[in-house]
Image (tube, grey):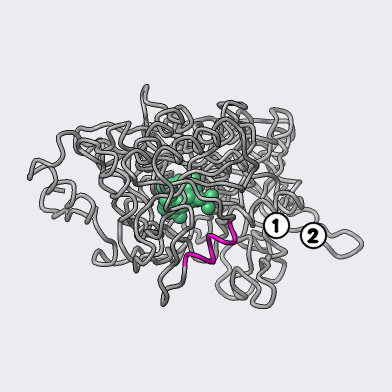
Amino acid sequence: MENEVVSKNFIEQIIEEDIREGHCKAVRTRFPPEPNGYLHIGHAKSILLNYGLAKEYGGKFNMRFDDTNPTKEKVEFVESIKEDIKWLGADWEDRLFFASDYFEQMYEAAVKLIKKGKAYVSDLNAEQIREYRGTLKEPGREDPGAVRGVEENLALFEDMRNGKYEDGSKVLRARIDMASPNINMRDPVLYRVAHMSHHNTGDKWCIYPMYDFAHPIEDAIEGISHSICTLEFEDHRPLYDWVVRELGYENPPKQIEFAKLYLTNVVTGKRYIKKLVEEGIVDGWDDPRLVSIAALRRRGFTPESIQRFVELCGVSKANSSVDYAMLEYCIREDLKLKRPRMMAVLNPIKLVIDNYPEGEVEYLDAANNLENEELGSRKIPFCRELFIEREDFMEEPPKKYFRLFPGNEVRLMHAYFVKCVGFVKDEQGNVTEVHCTYDPETKAGSGFTGRKVKGTIHWVPAPFAGKCEVRLYENLVDEEKGVYNKEDGSLNLNPDSLSILRDCYIEPALAEAGPYDSYQFVRQGFFCADAKDSRPDALVFNRIVSLKSSYKLPAQGNTQGR
Ligand code: ATP
Ligand code: MG
C-alpha cells in the first residue's frame, strides 16, 4: 500500500543509527539455539526477526548451534532444528556454525584474560561460590584464589584442561568486582571442569566454557554486528560488553534484548512438553496440539502463516502474551485463496434420491475455489445414493432451520435441488436414511431461476466416496482453569483436546492427498493430511482450524513495529 506508513521497530532504529554513525559496516545476525529440544513458535519469532533484519539491511544471517553444554544436548535435536529453520524460510546458505568448533579459541581467550590479570583459578565449590557472591543488599567477598599470580593461574588452568581435577573442584573466574551492584559482574565463572563426552568434540575437552563467556566470543568470531536475544539477558549485557572489550575485538558485537513471545493458554516450556511426551499424553514433540514448529507443520500451518503471525506480533521491550486466535487467523487468511474447497462428510447419514435412476452416474463440474479461478475445477460423480452430514437433517426442525426436514427443499452444492420426502429409522429410533426427490431442471450452472431455496448442503457420492479418519483438536489445556494448577504447578489438561472421527467420507478428488496436503472442507474448516499416520489406503486428516472465528485483529496501534 502506497500510503501506509511503516514505522521502524526499536531494533531497526538501533541498527540504522549504527549504520549512520559508522559503527556498523555490515549487518550480520544469527540464531543461536542450544540443541537441547525442539523449536517452538517463540523461537520462530527470534529466527524470523534475525533473518529478516539481515535481509532488510543487505547483511548476512548465521545459523549457529550454541553447543557448549554437553549434558543436555543431542544430535537428534541438531537435525530437527535445521529442518524447522529451513522450513520457516530462513536461509543461512553456507553459514552453519557450531560453538564447539571454537573451543580452542575460547581457551586461548581465557589464557589471554589470565595473562592480563583479568581471570584466576578458584578452589571454591559451587555452594561456596554462591555464598561468597553476596546478595542484592550485601557485596560479595573476595575469593581466596583471587590473589594468585599470573604464572600460577596459567599452570592451574592448563592442569584443568589436562584433566588433573575432578568435576566441580576448580573453576576459572573473571576478576571484575565483587562489590558490583550487578551480581553478574561479581567475578563470574568462565570455565568449569566437567568430564563429559560432547556430541561434536568427543572426549577432547574436560573443561567447558560458561554461556556468558562463550556467547560474546562466538558472536565476535563470526563478526556478528547485532546479537539479538531475549529480555532475561539484559542484566548480563555489562558482562557481554566486558568480555568483548577485555579481549580487544575490533568492531565488537552489540547485544540487544527484546521481549519473548508468549501465547495465552499455550504450553511452550520444554520441561512440561517433555513430560507430556514421556507420559504418552501427546503423540511426540510434533503432536498437532503443541506449538513446536514440527507440530505446527504437522497440523498444517504454512511458513507464510507463521511469518505473518510474527510480523503482526511486532517487536517490543515489554513482555506480553498473544492470543492463539491470532495464529489461527493467520493460517485461515493464508489458506483461504490458496487451497481447493472440497466436500467431506464427517458425521455421515445416507441420502437416497428416489427418482434418480439406479445405476446411473453423471459427472458434475465443480470449481475448486470460487474466489480463485487459477485452482481450476474437477468432476464429481453424482448418483442415487449420497452421504450428507447427520446435522443437515432433522425430523422436527426448530425455527430458522433451513436444511433438510420432511417437505423442505435444499440445494446440494454443485448439483441439484432435492426435496425431503421421507426417512427410515432403526429399532432404537435413530434415523438411518433420508429420502429425497431431485428436480433435474435445477442443475447447478444451468441458469435455473424458477425458485429459490434457503439452504445449501454438501455431500459425497456413496459408491465413490473414500473413507478416512479425521482428528479434531481443541486446546491442550483447560482455558477456564488456566495453564497451571495453582496448588502443585502441574498442567490443567483439557480431557477433550483430541476427538477422533473414524467414519468420515471424502469426495474422490481428496483420495490423492499426500503428506502435508491441505484443503478447505466446505462448511467445516481447513484440514491437512497427517504426515505421520496418513496412508494412501487409510487417509488421516488433521483439522488445522475451523472456518469461523469471532477473532478481530488488534487495532493498528496495538502492534508494534512492522
Ligand atoms: P532454554 O531454557 O533451554 O535456554 P530457550 O527456549 O531459551 O530454552 P535456546 O536454544 O537458548 O532455548 O533459544 C534460542 C534462541 O531463541 C535464544 O536467542 C532465545 O532468546 C530465543 N527464544 C527462546 N524462546 C523465545 C520466545 N518465547 N520468544 C522469542 N525468542 C525466544
Ligand atoms: Mg536459552
Who's the residue at 50% across and 59% down the image?
A: 453
Residue highlighted by disc 1:
390
Residues 138 and 20: in front is: 138
On screen, residue 161 versus residue 221, left or right, reads right
Q: Are marks 1 and 2 in contact (CB under 8 Å)?
A: yes
Up the image or down, 103 lies above or below 323; here it is above
Residue 528, percent across and down?
57, 41
Distance, label 1 to label 2, CA atoms, is 9 Å
Residues 120 and 504: in front is: 120
Please check the rendered image and state whether residue 462 is part of the magenta-colored stretch, yes or no.
no
Residue 483, percent across and down?
60, 68
Please check the rendered image and state whether residue 129 is part of the magenta-colored stretch, yes or no.
yes
Stretch in magenta? 126-133
Residues 562 and 240: in front is: 240
Up the image or down, 306 lies above or below 321; here it is above
Identify which amino acid the numbered label 1 is placed on: Arg
Q: Of the residues under marks 1 and 2, which one precedes in the sequence? A: 1
Identify which amino acid the numbered label 2 is placed on: Val
Q: Considering the numbered disc 2 on the image, is that residue within a helix, a strand or a loop? A: strand
Q: Is residue 272 visible?
A: yes
* Rendering quarter of residue 25: top left
Q: Is mark 2 within 8 Å of ligand 1?
A: no
* Rendering quarter of residue 560: bottom left
Who's the residue at 74% across and 54% down the image?
A: 281
Residue highlighted by disc 2:
431
Residue 521, percent across and down?
55, 46
Q: Considering the numbered disc 1 on the image, is that residue within a helix, a strand or a loop? A: helix
Prevailing secondary structure class for the magenta stretch in the rendered image:
helix
